[in-house]
Image (cartoon, grey):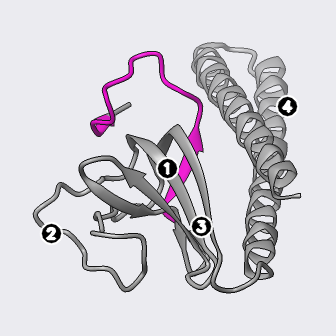
Amino acid sequence: SSNILISRIHHLQEFYANISAQIDSYCDKLVSYNRLYQNQENNEPYSVMILSYRIKLQNIRLFMLRANEKIVRMQQKLNSLRGQLPKGHVYVENGPFQYRCVYKGGVRYRNFPSNAAQILKEKPLVEFDDVVQIIQRVFITAEASVFLHMQGVGWLVENKNGIRCFERIERLPDQNNGVVKKL
């Protein structure tokens, strides 16, 4: 059941990225038509065209908001499923996995997989949009969080108290042996 939710989340993220590219395309067309509109004496046909692109843009934005709401609901449902697992159990999944930091303030490493673990301030901060290679995903039912192990560096938290810190991504062609890098 959680694999199905994760699959649906990845599908929606891909769809969301596709819609975002379409919005960029419409914005480029809108700007070019607006320039033509400003340079023409008979502006009526161009104003209709610009209006139709603005309506399409609004519809796409509404659709993206709905898709984002679905992603959030699925993440909440996945978190509730994790909460139903028996306490005191640990689930380990071996990688490698690629994760992107989606928390605006960045995330610091911990010395072991626990919310109570000491934060390693001497290690570099994983900044927003950085990508890391993870060797293990560990779910500790008592913690209700997923911890990501980066060999030789420390542990990161995937989500904490419903706040997403990392999202799993497809493998990048340029593997950098787990070193944090910008996309």
Q: Would you call the spot at circle 2 few (<14 residues within 10 Å), some (14-19), or many (20 or more)?
A: few
Give the extent of the magenta segment.
164-181
Circle 4 is placed at which residue position? 52
Circle 2 is placed at which residue position? 121
Q: CA distance from mark 3 to mark 4?
A: 49 Å
The quadrant holding residue 42 is top right
Q: Earlier in the sequence, mark 2 or mark 1?
A: 2
**Amino acid type, callout 2:** Lys
Circle 1 is placed at which residue position? 136
Q: Would you call the spot at circle 1 few (<14 residues within 10 Å), some (14-19), or many (20 or more)?
A: some
Q: Position of residue 90 (x, y in %)?
A: 61, 70
Q: Nearer the viewer, residue 14 or 60?
A: 14
Magenta region, main secondary structure: loop
Compared to residue 177, the image places residue 1 above or below, namely below
**Amino acid type, callout 4:** Ser
Q: Nearer the viewer, residue 93 or 116?
A: 93
Q: CA distance from mark 4 to mark 1?
A: 49 Å
Q: Position of residue 128 (x, y in %)?
A: 37, 52
Element under label 4?
helix
Element under label 1?
strand
**Amino acid type, callout 1:** Gln
Q: Which residue, as the protein is rendered here, is positioned at the far left?
A: 122
Q: CA distance from mark 2 to mark 1?
A: 22 Å
Q: Position of residue 144 (x, y in %)?
A: 61, 79
- Residue appearing at x 19%, y 69% in the figure: 120
Element under label 2?
loop
